[in-house]
Image (cartoon, rainbow, N blue to C red):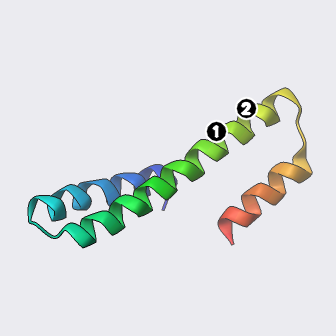
Amino acid sequence: MGLLHRASALASPAVTLLEAGNVVSAILLTRALMETVAVLADLHTKLIAFEKTPDVEAMDSFLMKGVF
């Protein structure tokens, strides 16, 4: 599952749960969503840096940490 798909899959049920009054579950999903967005922001930063100065080993290391 891609990160954008994961963000979407977390956001929608979080709203539904909050509207249903299930606050704790909504908070947990919202936290997971925030963590996913943080990873996306970090990936964006790394890709911008990689575009300027390609360091294949550093990019590979970053991506492998995220995958495994």
Secondary element under disc 2, as helix, strand or loop, is helix
Q: CA distance from mark 1 to mark 2?
A: 6 Å
Q: Which mark is residue 48?
A: 2
- The amino acid beneath tag 1 is His
Q: Residue at x 79, y 34 (%)?
A: 49
Label 1: which residue?
A: 44
Left or right, 59 with reference to 66: right
Left or right, 14 with reference to 55: left
Q: Quadrant of residue 45?
A: top right
Q: In the figure, 68 relative to 3: above or below? A: below
Q: In the figure, 54 relative to 10: above or below? A: above
Label total for image: 2
Left or right, 22 with reference to 47: left
Q: Quadrant of residue 14?
A: bottom left
Whether residues under marks 1 and 2 lie with C-beta atoms below 8 angstroms apart, the answer is: yes
Left or right, 37 with reference to 42: left
Q: Which mark is residue 33?
A: none
Report the quarter where the C terminus lies.
bottom right
Q: Residue at x 82, y 55 (%)?
A: 60
Residue 8 image offset from top left, x and y in percent = 35, 52
Q: In the figure, 40 relative to 30: above or below? A: above
Q: Residue at x 43, y 63 (%)?
A: 32
